[in-house]
Image (cartoon, rainbow, N blue to C red):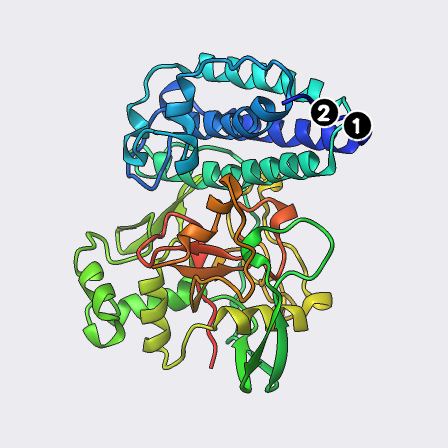
Amino acid sequence: MAIPTQIKSDTNLLLEYREVRQQSLHICKPLQAEDFVVQPISDVSPPKWHLGHSTWFFENFILAEYYKNYKRFDERLNYFFNSYYESQGPRILRSNRGNITRPGVETILEYRHYVDEHMEQLLQTSLHQEVKDFIRIGLHHEQQHQELLITDIKYILGTNPFFPVYTKSEVGGRKSEIGPANWISISEGIYNIGYQDNGFCFDNELGVHKVFLHDFEIQNRLITNGEYLEFMQNGGYHHFEYWLSEGWEWAKQLEIKAPLYWYEKDSEWYHYTLNGLRQVNLNEPVTHISYFESDAYARWRGLRLPTEFEWEVACNYLHHDIPVNGNFMETEHYHPIAQQDEQDTQLLGNVWEWTGSAYLPYPNFPRLKGALGEYNGKFMVNQMVLRGGSCATPRSHIRPTYRNFFQTDKRWQFTGIRLAK
């Protein structure tokens, strides 16, 4: 298809493209060659695959369609870097991505450079708005993979017995004790849910609709490591009555009955961070826990997790007062921080917060055709919704309506707990 010529080139979009693409390389800069290929579990993709897949997205959906006479870098890469798009042909199994020793990292970097050169040429021509919108989806898609890069790198290094340091950046933590969580009261009423602004959002945020909520209360901060440690010390992992049946079967198989990356040494708890192995700070938010653990902790406390609608309403209610002070990906701390004061609700940018809501489409969910129709809609089953964004989330993705989603046993992401009643 020839390049459209109805709308002038967009300098801002070109700059945005350069910044996003550079950020992916920046994240991978501390890695050694062997780190790029490792796939310890099927949930974790090798960093090399993320670099290739995000490049394939631009080549396959943009250049192949809108750059006249475009010649692909290597047709064989389609099989390696197609993730889940049935419409785009056969692909390697997700669990086998770590078997891709060839092409090597240098070739993948050459692939990125080749695609970037052609994308920059395309971006300096006149484009239809729909093409620009598709490019922006590609940029936000790559930013999602940047978050996955951080969490996948953490799993690769955090399961290495040497506990390698990824970055020497140190997060300043609050040392004094944090008092009991307070409660935010939200009145019964009918509320709007879903994205209503004019900027970018993903399709699963669309379908603005009304929900009725009864009076409820939600805590003004996240559950801390110290509070979760009390659950552990009181036999939380050993009493079936706190657990969903499926969660109990899962918990019985845990080798270490603690959050992911926690290790006990000389009666003290340590955890792996991207700054290396260090003693658990009891004031920081507990993270890397599953939905099963979050739900069990809430039951142990005689409370519950908020629904995703309660969470969004509470976040919007406090929106103008929320300090967005999480350690976002751009800061390179990649670690959640303790509540700074009573006004710090930690609602945005510390950990992804499990909700009690199943991941389902909103009313009037836009079921798109083609590849974009495969982006979110087909995953709306057997997963739970998380809200709030984490310390690994790009700041531009932090908003009250952003819906993340994972299966109930997953915990390699920065996932934590907020309680409601």
Residue 412: x percent and y percent? Answer: 37, 47
Q: Quadrant of the N terminus?
A: top right
Residue 414: x percent and y percent? Answer: 45, 51
Residue underneath mark 2: 123
Residue underneath mark 1: 9
Residue 120: x percent and y percent? Answer: 69, 20
**Of residues 346 and 20, the one drawn nearer to the viewer in this rendering:** 20
Q: Residue at x 53, y 59 (%)?
A: 175
In this view, 225 is above or below 334: below
Give residue 21's mark: none
The amino acid type found where label 1 is placed reads Ser
**Of residues 192 and 245, the one drawn nearer to the viewer in this rendering:** 192
Q: Residue at x 33, y 42 (%)?
A: 43
Q: Is residue 241 left or right of residue 206?
A: left
Badge 2: residue crowd in 10 Å (few <14, some 14–19, many ≥20): many
Q: Earlier in the sequence, mark 1 or mark 2?
A: 1
Q: What distance separates the C-alpha of mark 1 from that of mark 2?
A: 6 Å
Q: Is residue 9 left or right of residue 374?
A: right
- Kindly check if marks 1 and 2 are in contact, taking CB atoms under 8 A apart as contact: yes
Element class at badge 2: helix
Q: Is residue 282 visible?
A: no
Residue 280: x percent and y percent? Answer: 40, 53
In this view, 359 is above or below 14: below
